[in-house]
Image: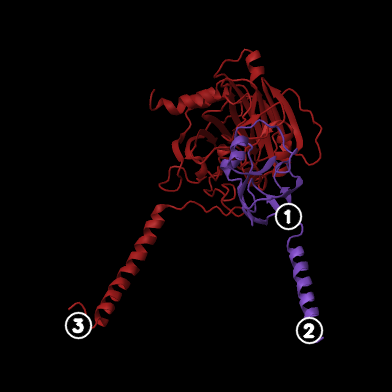
Chain colours: A red, B purple
Amino acid sequence: MRRPWLSLAAATAALLITAAPALGCGGLIGPNGAVNLLRTTTFAGYHDGVEHYVTAFEFAGGGGAFGSITPLPDIPSKVERGGDWTLQRLVLETEANRRLSLDTFAAAETAAGEAEVLLETTIDALDITILRGGGDEVGLWAKNHGFRLPPDSPEVLDFYAERSPIFMAAAFDADAAAARGQAIGDGTPIHLTIPTDNPWVPLRILALGKTAAETVQADVYLLTDEKPALLPNAGAFGESAGLILDHSDAASDSLLTDLRSDAGMEWVPNDAWLTKVVIDSAADQLNFDLAIDASGAGRPSPIDAGFAPFRPTPVPRSPIALYLGMGAMLIVAVPIGVERATRVGSRRPPFAGA
Amino acid sequence: MRWLPRLAVAALLLAATVTAGCAARGPVTVTITIHYSAFDLTEVSVPRGVPVTFVLVNEDPIDHEWLIGDEAFHEKHRTGTHEAHGEVPNEVSIPALETMRTTITFDEPGTLQYICHLPGHEAYGMVGTLTVEG
């Protein structure tokens, strides 16, 4: 089933995983509380109806395990180790102006009420599982596999499952990473190949488990055949609080050549448009996704952005519209106020105030 | 003997009053549903001295708790280390997508709170108030 949305690039939210059952009583984060995902960098390329999603899970120290759950627009046809320099080369490209395998898939047993396991694979110290199911089924699978889901997860999982029942669970075993000799800061890139009709990038999932006072910071790189239309319109005044259009230009030949030379990146076309969106948002404000129309038609879907019709969340409106509305109200209100003052004055008894 | 009918009426009225009182103070059931990590009832009043059965429905795919007590009780549980509850009626663990029942008789009037003390859940708003009416 192909969905008219795209990939989920930066959508990796760190979740705690415990080998033992989740502990009751407050305050227990488990032995792995020191493990965190910091700034997330992801790449979503879209070419010939196929999305290529590349992200990296970075070893940040600590013991135990942690993981993430990422909504996907459709079932990946391939999950493999990502190339060694794709993400780094993209960062270099957009910063320069300022400064300078899938081995096997095996179906697993699925318990009653749990999401269906579509694919399983291990990449370095990462156990990757592709799931299909509703919010409850995915949540139950995660709980039964040691993911300690935060309290906002039931609503967030439903938010995504209503659009696409495909999720990727990634469990990162920090002990195994340390045993493999991975140092703090080392990343494990993964590359998902997802046939889909149009790309979208889940953003709301990035706020999963965060308090309202926390901020979400992430960099999302898009490589599309045409200059994409975005919703919310990153960079448009007042329409994209928390989203910054950091780069939007035709991709350079050197970038495309470098990307194409990385493992699994031979699909990169000869001509493409590079977009970088920086997310720097309060967690409680990030209640939408990034809809992308890469067809050139300029019509990103409000549904893909999470605005309509299944969520009551209103589309952010430009303050220009607000100012126009206020101006219109003033135009009406001022004459009314003047008229009322005149009427009050005319009704005042002759001796009032005397 | 003219007072006999009046006596009979008075006796009937007294019996009716006692029966009504018993009915009012009979078993009480309170159903609290948890959805999207929120209690659907955050204000509950129950009578003193009557067994109250709480039906705790967890519609979420994650575990929750329902722990009821005073502030000292909750302060202890905020830093507690219990993996699960269930030994005592005012401490209930509710597994994902399951329903649990517990019956408590409150002997003293006052105000208590019920809270889920799983990490982050109280801060997320999983707090309710129970008033025991004298």
- Report the amino acid beneath label 1: Val
Query: Relative to the observer, which residue lies in front, A142 or B25?
Result: B25
Q: Secondary structure at mark 3?
A: loop
Q: Secondary structure at mark 1?
A: loop
Q: Which residue is mark 1?
A: B50
- Report the amino acid beneath label 2: Trp
**Distance between mark 2 and mark 3 Cα atoms:** 76 Å
Within 10 Å of the Cα at label 2, are there few (<14), some (14-19), or many (20+) other Cα atoms? few
Within 10 Å of the Cα at label 3, are there few (<14), some (14-19), or many (20+) other Cα atoms? few
Contact, mark 1 vs mark 3 (Cβ under 8 Å): no
Q: Is residue A40 left or right of residue A26?
A: left
Q: Which numbered disc, 1 or 2, marks the residue closer to the eye?
A: 2
- Report the amino acid beneath label 3: Phe
The percent position of residue A316, horizontal first and vertical second, equals 48, 51
Q: Is residue A221 left or right of residue A138?
A: left
The percent position of residue B52, horizontal first and vertical second, equals 73, 53
Query: Relative to the observer, which residue lies in front, B23 or A353?
Result: B23
Q: Which residue is mark 2?
A: B3
Q: Which numbered disc, 1 or 3, marks the residue closer to the eye?
A: 1
The percent position of residue A242, horizontal first and vertical second, equals 46, 41
Contact, mark 1 vs mark 2 (Cβ under 8 Å): no
Looking at the image, residue B88 lies above or below residue A328: above
**Distance between mark 1 and mark 2 Cα atoms:** 38 Å
Q: Which residue is mark 3?
A: A351
- In which quadrant will I find the N terminus of chain B? bottom right
The percent position of residue A21, horizontal first and vertical second, equals 72, 30
Chain on which label 1 sits: B
Looking at the image, residue B134 lies above or below residue A253: below
**Distance between mark 1 and mark 3 Cα atoms:** 70 Å
Query: Relative to the observer, which residue lies in front, A339 or B86?
Result: B86
Query: Picture quarter containing residue A199?
Result: top right
- In which quadrant will I find the C terminus of chain B? bottom right
